Image (spheres, grey):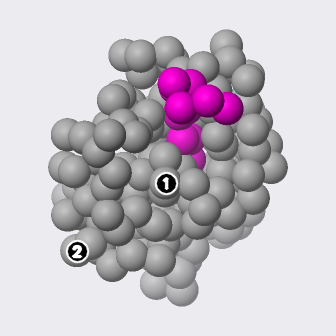
Amino acid sequence: MNELTLVAGVDEVGRGPLAGPVVTAAVILDPAFPIEGLADSKKLTEKKREALVPLIQQHALAWAMGRAEPQEIDEINILQASLLAMKRAVEALTIPPQHALVDGIHAPMLNCPVTTIIKGDQTEPAIAAASILAKVARDHEMQRMEVYYPGYGFAKHKGYPTKQHQEALMQLGPCDIHRHSFRPVQLAIKS
């Protein structure tokens, strides 16, 4: 690819949780403004991720978010919902990319060529930037959900199947943002 090719990095966050949306981001970085410290969002501290978000948003040529709601996840499954959310993020970019680099092995259907890269968030700065935007946005949303759905501990575990979350799920039953197609949630419904 030559230097003028507009490449979007695309990543998702939230495939594993029992609650909340899957959130994606697409980022076209500006080669003239490299951003120091981009890395896989899971390998950065919360403070470092929070500091990188405004840098990405200010210096990227374009960035956009996408998502799929728990009800969509239940209807079409988590993989298809993740791909749909990625497609939504890319389609929301103000500059259409000429190529997309997607973290993982599954590619969404896009209007440009797509290259999937296993652990791409560790090797491709644009994918790392997307993973940071998606993780921070989803974490903030799950922290807000603690107010609407107290007792589950969403602010702490962000919907992931921790022991605390599964115990709360069994005690309180599922709430509106739980993924009813996920086994631990189904077990809580039956109990």
| Between discs 1 and 2, the one toward the N terminus | 2
Q: Is residue 186 above or below residue 177?
A: below
Position of the N terminus by quadrant = top right
Q: Is residue 173 above or below residue 180?
A: below
Q: Residue at x 51, y 24 (%)?
A: 4
Which one is in front, 127 or 89?
Answer: 127
Count up the numbered dots. Answer: 2
Position of the C terminus by quadrant = bottom right
Looking at the picture, how far across and down is residue 152, in whole percent?
Answer: 38, 70
Spot the residue most to the front. Answer: 2
For label 1, count other residues whose C-alpha is less than 10 Å away and answer few (under 14), some (14-19) or many (20+): many
Looking at the picture, how far across and down is residue 77, in whole percent?
Answer: 74, 41
Which one is in front, 115 or 67?
Answer: 115
Mark 1: which amino acid? Answer: Pro
**Please, what secondary structure does the residue beneath circle 1 have?**
helix
Q: Which residues are magenta?
A: 1-11
Mark 2: which amino acid? Answer: Lys
**Which numbered marker is on residue 65?**
none
Is 7 covered by the magenta stretch? Answer: yes
Residue denoted by label 2:
47
Residue denoted by label 1:
125
Q: Residue at x 40, y 57 (%)?
A: 132
User: Does residue 71 appear to the left or right of 27 in the view shown?
Assistant: right
Q: Is residue 178 visible?
A: no
Where, by quadrant of the figure, is residue 189 drawn? bottom right
